[in-house]
Amino acid sequence: MQRSVTIVVAYLSCLVSILAAERPNILLFTADDLHAESLGAYGGKPADLTPHLNAFAAESKLFARAHVNVAICAPCRAVIATGRYSHRSGAMGFMPAREDVPDIVTTLKTAGYHTGILGKVGHSTPKKSMKWDYSFDQKELGNGRDPELYYQRSQTFLKECQTADKPFYFMVNSHDPHRPYCDPNALTKGAAMPSRVYSPEDVDVPGFLPDLPGVRAELATYLNSTRRLDDTFGKVMQALRESGAADNTLVLFITDNGIAVPFAKCNTWFHSSHSPLLVRWPGIVKPGVRDDRHFVSVVDFFPTFMEATGTDGPDELDGRSFLSLLKGETQAGRDHVFTQIDSKAGGAAVPMRCVQNEHFGYIYNPFSDGKYWYRNNNEGKTMAAMEQAAKTNPAIQARVDLFRHRVPEEFYDLKHDPDCLHNLINESAHTSTLQKLQALLETQMQKTNDPMLAAFKHRDDRVKVDEVLVSTYGPQKIAVPKTKKDRTKKKVQ
């Protein structure tokens, strides 16, 4: 009898080991402030800007309609960590999620995964109780801009996983191409030089920006940073290959938000939230496939990772798994995406809500009252060039004015105007479509207990809207700079 029990126990132990070995690893690589269309795989120019990512795309499934749900670093990463929209986790800006909200790291650790993170540690860890097994941040990675250090740290983590005989969840976060952009004549302390340097003539100016010399000059340094991002990605993939774990690893590449210039990051326009999403998983994901149909967003990552690893996930996740899409199937209900902003760095509340489908996008900006002077830390030399040109160019002046003050409602034909240059909110020809998107957004706000729902329902009543803003964020978060002098004092970073 004792011998039979011993055999059964040994068999079960062996079975557990086999099952554990078959569980896939997950490597999530994020860029910091990357314009999706900078990648060659997404039609970016110059086409050879991202050679490692271009090669990776050929081995991956490319999602053309991927988005982040919040186009700001910390709240975006909180959505990834919690699987909830910002107002459902408490991480409505540069603030922590509630401790009672489950997180992906703790969930996977409980399931036997070894967890590691490189770079953007604070922004990617929205709860004190969320503990990584292995962690190195910006200062230990050449200011987050040294591909060789990422390679060495990745090697160490992957060896740890082999020694522990555990599958892994590895979040690798480049600090490129976040500002300060790579100027070879004034290299950031600790940062490495990219494998190639670019000039203003190499720049393909995005359509939402004017083509000005000052814009080109700054975007050339952005290209340098993007090339270094690609260098870093290549070194991390090298470490993964050398570890022998590549064939059993689900690898995803995204950005945390759009490029850090006006009309992208920290807003809800199309290029604010549009993200590259490249997914490689040998034997599961067919390489070289492009999905132009389904909308997916980072709120879907948590449930996808749970299903992919066979892990029991927490209840009340806001997204849903897209594992079936990775296997080449289709999913109903993936014809739109919801994005939002609540608070910027510095704590200023500038709530925005957006719904987009394949053709149109609707944005509601409850903070926009004609007086609030919007500012963020994404302006740099690009905005300086725009403001200078605006003195003699009415069209550029109108763009600057829109950026500074916004309007309460925006409606764009994204199929023909993805740069969101022409607000169609008052055009009667689109009334029916507009109302459908407004109804879709209101249903979403009701479903998720969005605190901006009351403002949306009373969007034509400025007094009521202001009451909702104050009750939600507090009066200190929505104070409006009244004069140029005050604005200088109260620059929001």
Image (cartoon, helix red, strand yellow):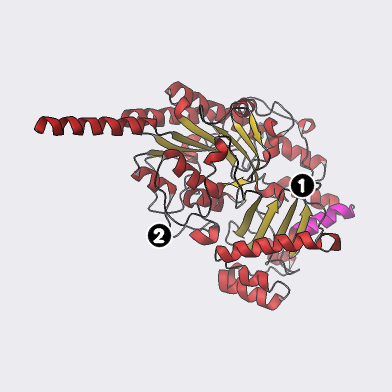
Q: Quadrant of the N terminus?
A: top left
Separation of marks 2 and 1 at Cα, in angstroms: 39 Å
Residue drawn 89% across and 55% down?
Answer: 394
Residue 450 falls in which quadrant of the image? bottom right
Local packing at callout 1 (Cα closer than 10 Å; few below 14, some 14-19, many 20+) is some
Q: Which residues are magenta?
A: 393-403
Q: Is residue 354 visible?
A: yes
Task: Name the residue rendered at 43%, 47% in the picture.
Answer: 104
Name the residue: 65% across, 61% down: 441
Tell me if 152 is positioned left or right of 335 in this view: left
Q: Secondary structure at mark 1?
A: loop
Which element type, helix, strand or loop, lies under badge 2?
loop
Instruction: Give the residue number, with chain letter if any, for mark 2.
Output: 100
**Percent position of residue 310, x then y:** 41, 41
Three-letter residue code for mark 1: Pro
Where 474 sits versus 173, above or below? below
At horizontal 61% and vertical 42% (from top left) the residue drawn is 178
Residue 173 image label: none
Q: Position of residue 60 (x, y in %)?
A: 59, 30
Task: Please give left or right for residue 186 compared with residue 78 in the image.
Answer: right
Residue 418's mark? 1
Mark closer to the chain start, 2 or 1: 2
